[in-house]
Image (spheres, helix red, strand yellow):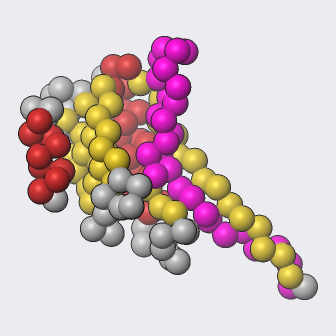
Amino acid sequence: MDKFNGFISELKLNPNIREDWRNRYILGMDEQSKTLVYCNFGEKGSKIAVSLPEVKKAAVTEDFQENGNIAGTKKILENLALRIEFKSPAKPAIQLPIYSAEDYSDLLGETVIASKWAQLINQQLTN
């Protein structure tokens, strides 16, 4: 949490909407400065700030692995992320990881978190 506070302080941001999960991830939105912030404090940690006026849309992406056996095929969620696409074709889309089966064996509401944040971001784009 201190690293997050240091990050937003450096950027002079004050996220009025914020969510953290698994003591590892934090998403925040400063509606006044129209900025999304994302922090992942895991092994491959990252701190990202995104200017929402540059964003075209946000969407949830899911990668599944199929496990087949005699009883049938079962899809298992491998990765869940927010995909941020930019208005400028020169700026590549970014993925903000929400869940990885490599790090956790079960979901703890991450699908709801991803959907909620995609919706929050897209709402800001229409304002």
Residue 21 in the image: above or below residue 121? below
Q: Residue at x 46, y 52 (%)?
A: 97
Residue lying furthest bottom: 70
Q: Looking at the image, how many numbered discs can be counted on the residues?
A: 0
Residues 67 and 58: in front is: 67
Residue 74 in the image: above or below residue 36? below
Does residue 81 appear left or right of residue 49 in this picture?
right
Residue lying furthest right: 70
Give percent across and percent down for residue 5: 12, 49
Residue 86 falls inside the magenta stretch: yes
In this view of the protein, can residue 30 be seen by the observer?
A: yes
Does residue 125 appear left or right of residue 16 in this picture?
right
Which is the main secondary structure of the residues drawn in magenta? Answer: strand
Residue 85 falls inside the magenta stretch: yes
In this view of the protein, can residue 14 be seen by the observer?
A: no
Q: Quadrant of residue 29?
A: top left
Does residue 51 appear left or right of residue 58 in this picture?
left
Give percent across and percent down for residue 92: 52, 25
Q: Quadrant of residue 36?
A: top left
Report the span colored magenta: 71-97
Residue 18 in the image: above or below residue 42? above
Residues 11 and 62: in front is: 11
Q: Residue at x 86, y 82 (%)?
A: 69
Does residue 101 appear left or right of residue 48 in this picture?
right
Give percent across and percent down for residue 110: 44, 63
- Image quarter hosting the C terminus: top left
- Image quarter hosting the N terminus: bottom left
